[in-house]
Image: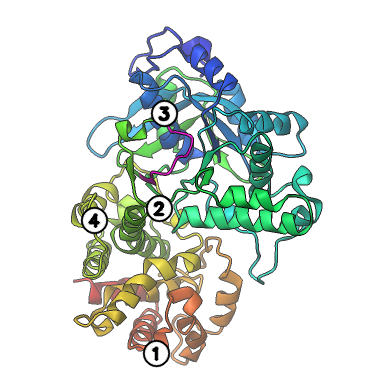
Amino acid sequence: MKLTYDNICNKVINNVSLPKYDVKKVVENTKANPIWLHFGAGNIFRGYIARLQDDLLNQGLATKGIIAAETFDYEIIDKIYKPNDNLTLVATLSATKPTEFRIVASVCEGVKADSSDVSSKTRLKEIFTNSSLQMISFTITEKGYGLKGLDGNYLPVVLSDIENGPSEAKHAMSIVCALLYERYLAGKLPLAVVSMDNCSHNGEKLQNAILTIANEWQKNGFVTSEFIDYLNDENYITFPWSMIDKITPRPANEVLEEVEKLGFTNMEPVTTAKRTYIAPFVNAEVCEYLVIEDKFPNGRPALEKVGVYLTTRETVNKVETMKVTTCLNPLHTALAVYGCLLGYKSIASEMESKELKSLVENIGKEGMKVVVDPKILSPQKFLEEVLYERLPNKAIPDMPQRIATDTSQKIPVRYGETIKAYLKSNTLSVDDLTYIPLAIAGWLRYLLAVNDNLEPMELSADPMLEELCSQLKDIKVGSLNNDLTALNPILANKQIFGVDLLETSLGEKVEGMFKEMLTGKGAVLNTLKKYCK
């Protein structure tokens, strides 16, 4: 049985929850007068965001779905969306209950955000110039908003967009800016432009990118100053901030086997030319959080009825700060680097190690002393859920190697903010920090690309990887003659840590822990045992 409208409409499929609404009617309504367009057609969208609108449709609280637009890997539309009538089979993985399966049918159309594809370009313009459109949202990863390279100069594709104007836009942010210009020309129609990416101040990042493109176009005569005014006027265009939290790992073989037992065919994952690994099904954890700044100048779906927190920007920022500096992300990063060093293949299996469990429990305790309390969520309860329900969930096939990606970009927020809070405190001292320095030392040891068994290991992608590994290339595990002054430029790098660690006692502490991990085979685990009793 293939995943298609004809195979699910008015049918009963054992152990699978099906849409309770007229799918084809919702598709017709949505295509004619869309209310929601989402950029980024990957797993977090299909397994969570689209499911929220599916919840509203099932409860009779909505009559329209979402249109998905892919900005990076157009094969997703051709190989996943079209063959399955834009449907997704969502598998919710619980640690204590059988897997729950559900077909999400709220995605009514899949479009390529590709300006070279005439039909897609025309369709996106139709959507953007329709007054019914209330919001566009994004899960394109933080990189998707980046306009400049590490050298501080515009990326070649962005420079080309700036020089050639809206009609030739190729970068995701340029394409969206061009479409917003079409909406402006259609009568200054209002719209909420909502980043739902898992990054700090996501709305601000999105807004800055769009305004940068628009201002460059205005300088080159492609758009008027009135268009800039339109983008800056919250009566017309808003850029709400949000915080999203739900793990949707890459498709797991164990879940595929369950899916096939249900009778579905053609559900195997595909690997695209751009190395996207994706399947017609999504596996996801039970826990989920979405907090959005409530600024929607053209109305919005009733998301508060399906568990979304609609609140102020200040509260969104506090929830995001709580999550990424204390309750989840710092723990994930520590498990990622140590998991790679110690040969673990899943986060859940790491939580069976008393040393690693102690490490993340204590990182949480260190952060909790300076945590920002958002009030709408309890930091302590959130942390306990992470430690004792989410991270140990064996049903979630999440790998430390995936989470170790781009660690240099994550550390300034995940650890740096807590360090800065300790430095500012009148009652706390960075001298009292043990487990955050241990996490940092573990990352530096990871950069040597040799695991705790002294075997070479592949490092996850990171924009600073080449630079950092080059600085540490002469440090050898097992050598008694290492010159650890090579660490100094890294420890002093405020871009990485948010502060110069050498100006605090943490520099010496991290170096000492790092040195302990160099003594030979098993030194990483022995160091963990020493501190994580």
Three-letter amino acid code of the residue under disc 3: Gln
Q: Is residue 8 left or right of residue 101?
A: right
Q: Which contiguous range is marked in magenta?
A: 291-300
Nearest the viewer among 39 and 237 is 237
Which label lies toward us, 3 or 2? Answer: 3
Which label lies toward us, 4 or 3? Answer: 3
- Residue that carries the numbered disc 2 in the rendered image: 345
Indicate which disc, 1 or 2, sits on the residue closer to the N terminus: 2
Q: In the rendered image, which quarter contains the C terminus?
A: bottom left
- Residue that carries the numbered disc 1 in the rendered image: 503
Whether residue 165 appears in magenta in the rendering, the answer is no
Q: Residue at x 24, y 83 (%)?
A: 429
Distance of label 4 from label 3 (alpha carbons): 28 Å
Position of 452 relative to 77 (above/below): below
- x, y percent for residue 347: 35, 53
Q: Residue at x 39, y 81 (%)?
A: 514
